[in-house]
Image (cartoon, helix red, strand yellow):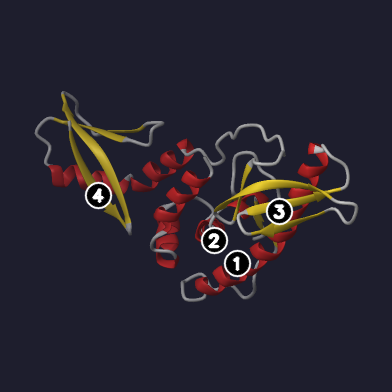
Amino acid sequence: MNEHKIDFGSTEIHFNLEYKDRKTLKISVHPDLSVKAQAPKGEKLEKIKKKMKKRAPWILKQKEKFQTYLPATPPRKYVSGETHRYRGKQYRLKIIKTPGKEQVKLKGAFLCLYIQELPNPVKAQQLLEKWYRKHAQAIFAKRLQVCTQLLQRSPLKLSQTPELQLRKMSKRWGSCTSKGKILLNPELIKVPTKCLDYVIIHELCHIKFRRHSGSFYELLALVMPDWERWKQRLEEVSS
């Protein structure tokens, strides 16, 4: 079995090719994201690649189905020393007793939670989630404006920045409604800015192309040529 590749826009699709006693080309995508092609014996590689390119939108769609959007993470205990992410970086949680205002502050390598009564993991979780959401609302709105401006240089020219809504989703980073509203998972506040931009641009492209068609990926690659790099990075930092 030999490995080959085809180019689809700026995307490279690698596949393993095997010749079999069959009349047509069979393409399969596996949960580990590998792509396998079984071709009739004697069929020329150039012809096989041409057929593979025609099926490229379907291949990418199948690979996307197998992607783990939000891998399971160990249950959080919300105690000092625990690691939490913010904008792509890891911080140590530090729970501090205070007689004053309960709040969260980012200090160096620490996320400091000031709480009146200890131990109180429920209060710690509430404070931290509220803090995450507050920052997500402001940062997501700013990045949506930036990404919308990027699309002005593409065939998709938006008259204004779409409406934004934060929504917790168990299996998705984002979504685009039929009316063009952009929904973003607040968990994205934990990933690098470029990963956030990738999700936003991905959803903005859905305003013009609802399905993951070839045209959709062409537009995505036009606006963000290195989108695959940040998609992969997103999967790495969320594990």
* Disc marking residue 6: 4
Crowd around label 1: few <14 · some 14–19 · many ≥20 (10 Å): some
| Element under disc 2 | helix
Task: Tell me which residue sits at (44%, 67%) in the image.
Answer: 223
The amino acid sitting under disc 2 is: Thr
Distance, label 1 to label 3, CA atoms, is 16 Å
Q: Mark 1 and 3 residues: CB-CB less than 8 Å, in contact?
A: no
Q: Which residue is mark 1?
A: 143
Crowd around label 4: few <14 · some 14–19 · many ≥20 (10 Å): some
Residue 237 coordinates in the image, percent (x, y)? 51, 46
The amino acid sitting under disc 1 is: Arg
Residue 224, visible in the rendered structure: yes
Distance, label 1 to label 4, CA atoms, is 33 Å
Q: Quadrant of the N terminus?
A: top left
Q: Which residue is mark 2?
A: 193
Q: Report the side of 57 relative to 202 (left or right).
A: left
Which comes sooner in the sequence, label 3 or label 4? Answer: 4
| Element under disc 4 | strand
Task: Tell me which residue sits at (57%, 72%) in the image.
Answer: 146
Which comes sooner in the sequence, label 4 or label 2? Answer: 4
| Element under disc 3 | helix
Above-or-below relation of 125 to 89: above
* Disc marking residue 132: 3
Above-or-below relation of 19 to 194: above
